[in-house]
Amino acid sequence: MAAKDAEKVLDVQSVVEAVVADEDADVPRYEVESLCMRCHENGTTRFLLTLIPNFRKILLSAFECPHCGERNNEVQFAGEIHPRGCCYSLEVHAGDQKTLNRQVVKSESAIIKIPELDFEIPAEAQRGTLSTVEGILVRAIDGLESLQEERRKVDPQTAEAIDQFLLKLKACAIGDSSFSFILDDPAGNSFIENPFAPSKDPSLSIKFYERSPEQQASLGYYVESSQSEEAEGGVSTSGVDASNQVRGEAHGSVGAAAGHRAIAQSNSAEIAEALFRYTAPEEVMTFPSTCGACAVRCETRMFVTKIPYFQEVIVMATTCDACGYRSSELKPGGRIPEKGKIISLCVKNVRDLSRDLIKSDTASVKVPDLDLELTSGTLGGIVTTVEGLITKISESLERVHGFTFGDSLDENRRNKWLDFKTRLTKLLSLEQPWTLILDDALANSFIAPVTDDIKDDHQLTYEEYERSWDQNEELGLNDMDTSSADAAYM
């Protein structure tokens, strides 16, 4: 029996090799003998690699000491670090116990903030955890209370200030006070549950952002000193490499085929096929940039093109030879339109599904037949087709709403999600006509007509409208002053 028990205790290297060997295989639970930090006797740590459906693969570890009874658990992420960081902002109203019970996945690199209390939980204070909003606050309260007796003896004034702060924090934890719960993770591996999925959550907002050089370094990426200087506003005075200069290549030397190849290599063929159908670039610009995933120097290609019935657009595509990361962006060219635009398309046949579509990062998407609405910023700016947009929406909902099929989900909500997914899939089968609406306050979105003259396409309608003050404020237009520039051109 002793020999069999010894075989069950593995070293850490064996556990790591097992959990990364086969992603699809069922990985059993492993046990590792480890030191208890309270009594310094040996306890047991159990590892389990599991997958939160539609979210991420995680490694759960639980330690237990049979000598002193010490227990703790931790969540680590077995998958990759995402190219962009994420920031979740949850508004918790007084008396709303359901919001406090929302499940939260906090990675080891995530920071939690409560602006109303000027309170921040640094990444190292609470390691990776799977908890709730209330659970994270209670854990923070316990951590602050643990050394209060010692503080009262050494520094009574500080201890009294902490006692007053704990009263406010406890009021938030039990739901007596309203507050904002912000979860900021540079690795992009944290998550807050949306109980209204797949519909919009009025209390929860999500933003994705490019990591700073400091955040890259904190995640273990190598960051060059010149990048840190640039981030701080410093200018490097060292020799300038000629390869780092922006260079333009004439259309005669580059050619449409070379421009096609430059964009297609940087991402999928969707961008090249959709845009080069209209016109070839007159000039492809190449300039140095930094990879958003590994922070290594790479190249970004850019060209300007004109789309009929739309406007001038700038296509940018980046490829990193070091890690293979690829990204593409579509930016509007020219001046900011005076009015917003609503584009409505009645989808009736396969030809409508194949229409080229440009959705800018300021456009919202609505499908009234499903009561589906995606706010501006969701999915970012993309070049695709109508069918591709619906597919991306489905994939995005599955990725973002990580607890859709979790064990804690009740049957009614599970059936609601399954019914929605079925209805979303049926849109592509064209069992009945449906309507797609793009609402873009900057009029930078586009759906291609199927006729030579856009006026002859009766399934496609464009409607312009005056932007509200709030929309201009969100876009930063209310504070924009162009008088000096106007005077220079007069």
Image (cartoon, rainbow, N blue to C red):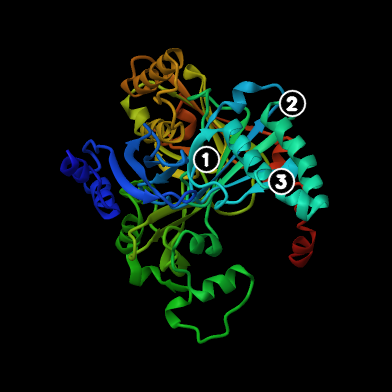
Instruction: Measuring from the top left, give residue 310's x and y in whole percent.
Output: 51, 44
Identify residue type, mark 3. Gln
Q: Is residue 270 left or right of residue 198?
A: left
Q: Is residue 283 in view from this perspective?
A: no
Question: Residue shown at 25%/48% (left/top)?
Answer: 10
- Single out the mark in the foreground, 1 or 2: 2
Seen in the image, is 429 located left or right of residue 490?
left
Marks 1 and 2, the one that precedes in the sequence: 2
Per the model, the C-alpha gap separating discs 1 and 2 is 44 Å
Which residue appears at 67% of the width and 44% of the height?
A: 144
Residue corresponding to mark 2 = 176
Sort mark 2 into few (<14), some (14-19) or many (20+) by Cα contacts within 10 Å. Answer: some
Q: Residue at x 35, y 47 (%)?
A: 79
Q: Nearer the viewer, mark 3 or mark 2?
A: 3
Residue carrying label 1: 445
Give residue 341's quadrant in the image: top right
